[in-house]
Image (cartoon, rainbow, N blue to C red):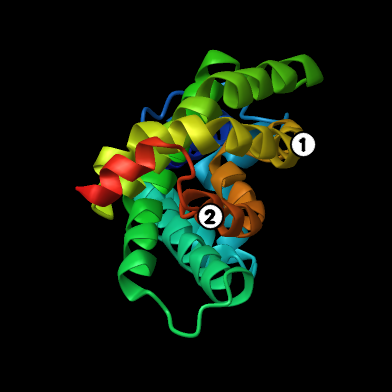
Amino acid sequence: MKTDEKPCALSDQESKASGDPEDQQGGGSGSEDDGYGSGGGDGGHGGDDSPDGYSKGKDSGSPFGWYLLLLNKHPVTTKGITSALLTLFGDLVCQLMIEKSETIDFTRLGIFTLLGLLLVGPTLHFWYLILSKWLPGPGTLRAVARLILDQFLFSPIFIGVFISALMTLEGHSHDIVPKLKQDWLNVVFANWKIWIPFQFFNFLLVPQQLQVLAANVIALAWNTYLSFAAHKDIIAPARKDSISS
């Protein structure tokens, strides 16, 4: 009986060992997080996009291990909170350093931060996920294709949605149309100047799971400009009606 048990134990160990490479390659675990790194990931990182890659980073004592763990377990919430913090700092810098306000408008700051939490972070998470599924795998051509969709399809629409949502929450929904007519195109052009070169390298080199984080680093400066542009006074004649009312 003892001699029969040992070969069985060896066969079990061998089968587990043979299964490990498949698991590390994302061989159909079917979990939600696997989807974020499936199809080879963005920028040719392959297995680095898998949850196993983030667990290894955490176990190795990486300074970003805690953040990678949160990304793995709660990607939407983590990216939403990250975006909220950066929109908060962006509007704060805009008020104090660009507009040189003597006091902080906390209502405006709260609304801008709320949009980062509920709109910017989650939307970018799902958008980048969609791009990685539409155009999976590494390569310059795929990065260019993702860049074109991101900057010439998604960004102009999202900028309009963001400005409209901001003005609605601030109680100026009646000024949305004249505001978009005045500033939307200028904001889109500014967006292209900043984001086209950055997003090319973001899509080419950064794993999909970390693309929102990478974008948010640049977004600190972008949010400062966006806050300034979104709160500029409307010069169009339509403003007279809104003031008199």
Residue at image position (77%, 20%) is: 139
* Left or right of residue 148: residue 240: left
Residue at image position (44%, 23%) is: 28
Q: Which residue is mark 1?
A: 201
Reply above or below: 207 against 25: below
Picture coordinates of residue 106 (x, y %)?
A: 34, 75
Do we see residue 4 in this rendering?
no
Picture coordinates of residue 161 (x, y %)?
A: 38, 34
Picture coordinates of residue 46 (x, y %)?
A: 66, 31
Q: Which residue is mark 2?
A: 55
Residue farthest to the bottom, as pictured: 102
Give the residue type that dot 1 points to. Answer: Phe
Q: Nearer the viewer, mark 2 or mark 1?
A: 1
Comes first in the chain, label 2 or label 1:
2
Picture coordinates of residue 25 (x, y %)?
A: 58, 30
Q: Quadrant of the N terminus?
A: top left
Assign a secondary structure to mark 2: helix
